[in-house]
Image (cartoon, helix red, strand yellow):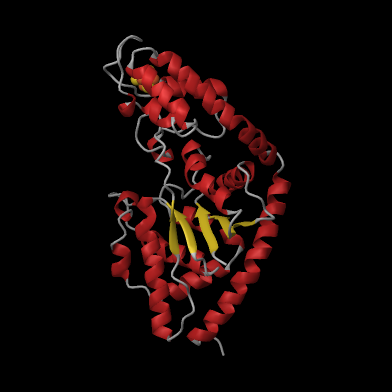
Amino acid sequence: MDRVVSGMRPTGVPHLGNLQGALRKWVELQDSYESFYFIADWHALFGLEERSREIKQNTKSALATLLAIGLDPEKSTIFVQSQVPEHTILFTIFSAITPTGWLGRNPTLKDMVRADEPLPYGLLGYPVLQAADILLYKGTLVPVGKDQMPHLEITREIARRFNSMYGVEYFPEPQAVLNESPVLPGIDGRKMSKSYGNIISIEDDFETIKSKVRLMITDPQKIRKSDPGHPDICTVFQMEKSFVSTEYAEDIFAKCVQGALGCVAHKDSLAKIIWEYLSPIREKYFYYMSHPEELVKVANYGAGKARKIAAQTIEEVLDITGVVL
Ligand code: SF4
């Protein structure tokens, strides 16, 4: 049976872009595959912007979000990466066989490096840790967005290199499960991302959501309600499409083009749609945030399940590499 593996960096309070992108896919996949989902706290430590004391709080928030959106600890193995030390053991083994040239090719590296700071080894090597994260569980399917395909390719290359160096067929070459849903725009029209400061977060209340949506960029040529608009260049419409049916979106499109819809009314309607979507998720989220003992229970339970497989892999890998007697 195929095995799905994926992780989420705890970099802040999760936002709509996370929920409507990767996490929605995770929930869908847990019904069809054996799934391993983890909070990638080692990766947060390796990121430049998260070298702070916030990792613990963000890990809690990420875990509460996974449960709030419907991941089920009985269906999926849900855990925190640092609770399974085998990730770092496999990372060390893969570090020994991965050419640095492969890591220099990583296209997202240049976005993460700051000109005024030296490049830490951990940041250069994080695709090696990603490979360890996936291959530790012999993951065969990895849900990714298009921009993460190069990382998965490095994982596949590392699996190939290990197998060929040791003359074994041990690690599978995982395949991508492409997330086809379009990238959710933030309030400024760019991809929704904490680093752009354009997010609607799971913790935002209705008034905050409403005021953020009011700031969204629309068609600059539509000044009055009666002006014919261009929804295809409007962030409000692009965001709304993620939450409504095709018929609803087509109706809005037609009304905007015909000059039968005003931007302020449309923004307020989108704020309500987002609120209706978020409300039940927020309720569960805040429940878990105020019951940290339940989060610890879930994380320990998941780590216990993950470690059984991880320990087996490490035992076999150490045997193959001849590191232990
Ligand atoms: S009416 Fe709606 S879709 Fe049309 S430009 Fe205004 S906000 Fe955008």
Please report the residue visible at 61 percent of the width from the left and 30 percent of the height from the top.
279
Q: Quadrant of residue 309?
A: bottom right
Please report the residue visible at 41 percent of the width from the left and 26 percent of the height from the top.
250
Left or right position of 14 against 69 = left
**Nearest the eye: 245 or 96:** 245
User: Relative to residue 277, is residue 145 depicted above or below?
Assistant: below
Please report the residue visible at 55 percent of the width from the left and 45 percent of the height from the top.
58
Residue 163 visible: yes
Image quarter (top left, top right, bottom left or bottom right) of the N terminus: bottom right
User: Relative to residue 71, is residue 123 depicted above or below?
Assistant: below
Left or right position of 60 against 178 = right
Please state the total of marks drawn on the protein image.
0
Q: Quadrant of residue 280?
A: top right
User: Relative to residue 70, is residue 94 depicted above or below?
Assistant: below
Please report the residue visible at 51 percent of the width from the left and 34 percent of the height from the top.
201
Image coords of residue 50 (percent x, y): 46, 48
Image coords of residue 129 (percent x, y): 45, 64
User: Relative to residue 222, is residue 164 depicted above or below?
Assistant: below
**Nearest the eye: 291 or 136:** 136
Q: Quadrant of ligand 1?
A: top left
Image coords of residue 112 (percent x, y): 35, 51
Q: Residue furthest bottom?
A: 325
Image quarter (top left, top right, bottom left or bottom right) of the C terminus: bottom right
Image coords of residue 160 (percent x, y): 39, 75
**Nearest the eye: 6 or 233:** 233
Residue 54 visible: no
